[in-house]
Image (cartoon, rainbow, N blue to C red):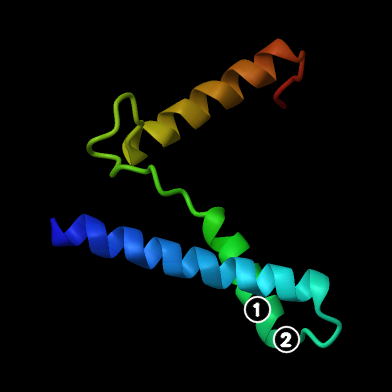
Amino acid sequence: MARPTARWGAALALGALWWWGVLRLVLAPDAGVLEGVVATGGWGLSLLPVHCVPKSRAEGAAGSDQWAESWRRWRTAWGRGRGTQSR
């Protein structure tokens, strides 16, 4: 039970810190680099893919050995379908 509480506490504290940085940037005329770094860092973290799973556990994921074959098939089909001639 302590783990979820600690996670929620950390999430709330970091969220409050981010909002402090954003509101200082918008409202305070003397806001500086620190507030900008906090706001930008929080926004950058929101871009991280947090719902990823390892390729070995993902359904329908192509392995590295399958990419080369797919690439060859695609190049062959693209070359023939576009009317290009090999010389």
> What number is the disc on residue 53?
none
Q: In the image, 27: left or right of 63?
A: right
Quarter location, residue 83: top right
Front residue of 7 and 66 = 7
User: Where does label 2 land, which residue?
Assistant: 33
Q: Is residue 29 above or below residue 9?
A: below
Quarter location, residue 82: top right
Q: Secondary structure at mark 1?
A: helix
Front residue of 51 and 20 = 20
Q: Are marks 1 and 2 in contact (CB under 8 Å)?
A: yes
Q: Is residue 7 above or below residue 25?
A: above
Amino acid type indicated by mark 2 = Val
Front residue of 1 and 62 = 1
Q: Secondary structure at mark 2?
A: helix
> What number is the disc on residue 37?
1
Residue occupying image coordinates x 54% and y 73%: 17
Q: In the image, 58: left or right of 32?
A: left
Amino acid type indicated by mark 1 = Val
Q: In the image, 55: left or right of 86?
A: left
**Number of numbered markers:** 2
